[in-house]
Every structure is written in C-alpha cells, then in structure tokens.
Amino acid sequence: KMLQDRNQELERLVEQVEKLSITDPLTSLFNRRKMIEIKTAQNQFLVNEKTFTLAILDLDHFKKINDQYGHTFGDIALQTFANLLNRQIISPNLVARWGGEEFLLLFPLHNGQDTQRQLEALQEACSNDQLLRYRMDSVHLSFSAGIYEVENYQNLEDMIKCADQALYEAKSLGRKQIILYKEGLSVV
C-alpha cells in the first residue's frame, strides 16, 4: 500500500513537472517547448493534406508601455493580452508566448482567411477601453500579425520565417496590421 501511494505521488509530481516545462510562468500560456505540437499538424497535413496556419503576433509599442508605466505594469499588459488570447482563440488552436511580447498561434484546421478573420476579431476585442487600465487611464493594446498558410510540407523554421516576414511587413505598414504571407515579401 505504501509503495502504491509513493508511486501515485511520483506520477503526480512527474505530471506537474511536465506541465511546468511547457508553460510560460508569466502568462500561463504554452511556451516554445509546447509548440512542438506543430509537428502534429504537419503530420495531419501529410496524411489528409489539411491546410493549417501559423500566426506570429507582436504587441505594438510595448516598449512604450514599459517605459511609461513601468515593467510591473508591462507584465500586467502581457497577462491581460494572454487572457484575451485564451478567451478568443479556443481549442484545437494553440497559443504560446514565443518570447518577450511575441506570441505564436497554431490553427490546425484553418486556412489563412479564416485565421485572418479570427485575428481581426481579436484586434477588435483589444480596442475595448476597459481591457487595460492604469489608474484612470485606458492603455490601448494592439498587435501586428503575420500569418502563414501551410500548403505544402515544410520544416518548422521555414514556416516560422514566412510568418515572421508577414509580421515584418505588418509592422512596416504602420503596425496594427494583419498580413497574410505571400511570395515576394521582403526577407527578414
């Protein structure tokens, strides 16, 4: 009985460690390590040729928020945005904090236009004046996004590079833009 209890306790601990290893501590979103799940979408693509999309989002003018309100409030802004992502982007889609103020989203069953519509709704939700407040001020959040629709098998780095090129294009157009990757975008 004692051995059985010990084993159950160890199994619970291993489960906790596994969960911690794929979770961003600040936002409670998945982290880079979890996005290996993209391989599942790639495999489904190989089997049934199901298009899927990747999107990289970057909070606009985040440095300004940190500079104006402080890093603690910057963390609150990231957490607020993460909570909004969790409410708006639902399973089977995956959301991860990619680093800093960048987020990577996987839409395993969406084409580029579907993803663009979802991100436009997210951008609209960001414009709510009550979303993020500092004392009496509304602090506006917006993001730039690059979307890549995967239509043929590629490695993860190439897919991310394409989404990143679209993100770069969105930023160069003045931010608060959502750009779907197409051939010929400038190389980052």
Image (cartoon, rainbow, N blue to C red):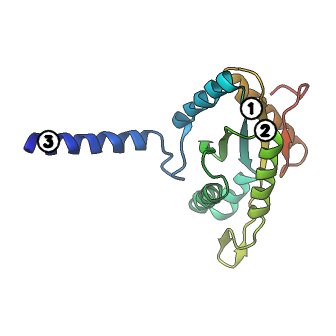
Is any part of residue 156 visible from this angle?
A: no
Are the residues at dot 1 and dot 2 in contact (C-beta closer than 8 Å)?
Answer: yes
Q: Is residue 52 above or below residue 92?
A: above
The residue at 74%/27% (across/down) is: 161
Give the amino acid type for the residue marked by disc 3 in the picture.
Gln
Q: Position of residue 64 (x, y in %)?
A: 73, 56
Report how far apart the C-alphas of labels 1 and 2 lie in the structure: 6 Å
Q: Earlier in the sequence, mark 1 or mark 3?
A: 3
Are the residues at dot 1 and dot 3 in contact (C-beta closer than 8 Å)?
Answer: no
State the residue position of label 2. Answer: 111
Label 1 element class: loop
The residue at 15%/45% (across/down) is: 5
Viewed as shown, does residue 15 lie left or right of 61? left
Give the amino acid type for the residue marked by disc 1 in the picture.
Thr
State the residue position of label 1. Answer: 51
Q: Is residue 119 above or below residue 146?
A: below
Label 2 element class: loop
Label 3 element class: helix
Q: Earlier in the sequence, mark 1 or mark 2?
A: 1
The answer to which image quadrant residue 123 occupies is bottom right
Question: Which residue appears farthest toward the front when viewing the image?
Answer: 48
Q: Earlier in the sequence, mark 2 or mark 3?
A: 3
State the residue position of label 3. Answer: 4
The answer to which image quadrant residue 109 occupies is top right
Q: Position of residue 160 (x, y in %)?
A: 71, 30
Q: Is residue 134 above or below residue 32?
A: below
Question: Which residue appears farthest toward the left when viewing the image?
Answer: 1
Report how far apart the C-alphas of labels 1 and 3 lie in the structure: 46 Å
